Image (spheres, rainbow, N blue to C red):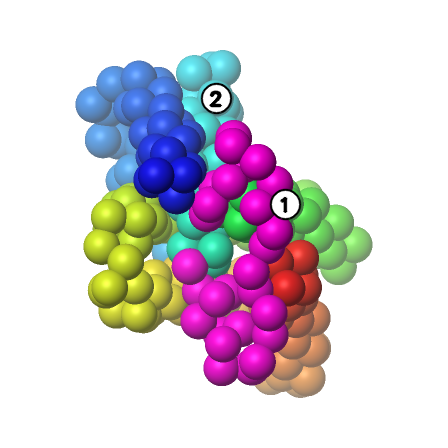
Amino acid sequence: MLESQASSWIYVILFTLFFLTCIRVRGNFKFLGSFFRDLTEVRERENLFDATMKETSFIFLILLLSGCSIGVLMSRAVPLFGQRLHINTELPDPGFFFGGELLPAVICMVIACAYIGSMWVCYTVVGKVFSDTHHTWLWVRGFTAGTGLGAAVFFPLAILALTYPPYTVYILAAAFVMLILVKFLFIVKGFRIFFTESSLWVVFLYYLCSLEIVPLVITFGLACSLLG
């Protein structure tokens, strides 16, 4: 019963964010089209999301939805990997409200949202240090767009993971494929923006390790550590 009530709270969190996001977009699918162009194109054009507070709040909500959905999926992945690595991933029952699977899910939601926010800051800082403001803006916009588009897949997968636990492995595999696809498109965009000389291959490899691989490993390792 406690586990069922905990799952209900996770549903409430996800669907509240989903409905708030839908209210902000109000059926205007140009937002999704702009996200896809921002993720794949490098040419200069007007930014759809610079105009009003409505677009800004929509971006914030969809990034939050994406982060929380990823957090739920992460909370499902940690026990699977923990069992393979012989890590204790069971938390003591802290009471009614945070009982069952709610506390691990909330912890992973916070970690995932912190990852998205910290990466946004990292891309902004690195871009401004090694390039100009315009190219940095294109780069960060691509990251924002990729994360926002990911919500369209991560949210239903998170709901499926909560609803059909026996299929968790397959759901996590689908989420991982989506993550790799979004990362690949974003990396390609960054390569087209910044790496215009063949001599920059070493720098590109260093970027892959320091900004794309290591933070993901640290994020998942932190989740395993906190839930261990």
Amino acid type of the residue that numbered disc 1 sits on in the rendered structure: Ala
Q: Secondary structure at mark 2?
A: helix
Q: CA distance from mark 2 to mark 1?
A: 18 Å
- Residue 161 placed where, x, y %? 30, 54
Q: Nearer the viewer, mark 2 or mark 1?
A: 1
Q: Considering only vertical position in the picture, is 97 above or below 51?
A: below
Amino acid type of the residue that numbered disc 2 sits on in the rendered structure: Ser
Residue 91 within the segment the image draws in magenta: yes
- Residue 85 placed where, x, y %? 56, 81
- Residue 116 placed where, x, y %? 57, 47
State whether the magenta stretch is mostly helix, strand or loop: loop
Q: Considering only vertical position in the picture, is 222 above or below 86?
A: above
Residue, far right: 129
Q: Quadrant of the C terminus?
A: bottom right
Q: Nearer the viewer, residue 191 or 221?
A: 221
The structure residue drawn at horizontal position 61% and vertical position 41%, both measured from the top left corner, is: 94
Q: Is residue 82 visible?
A: yes
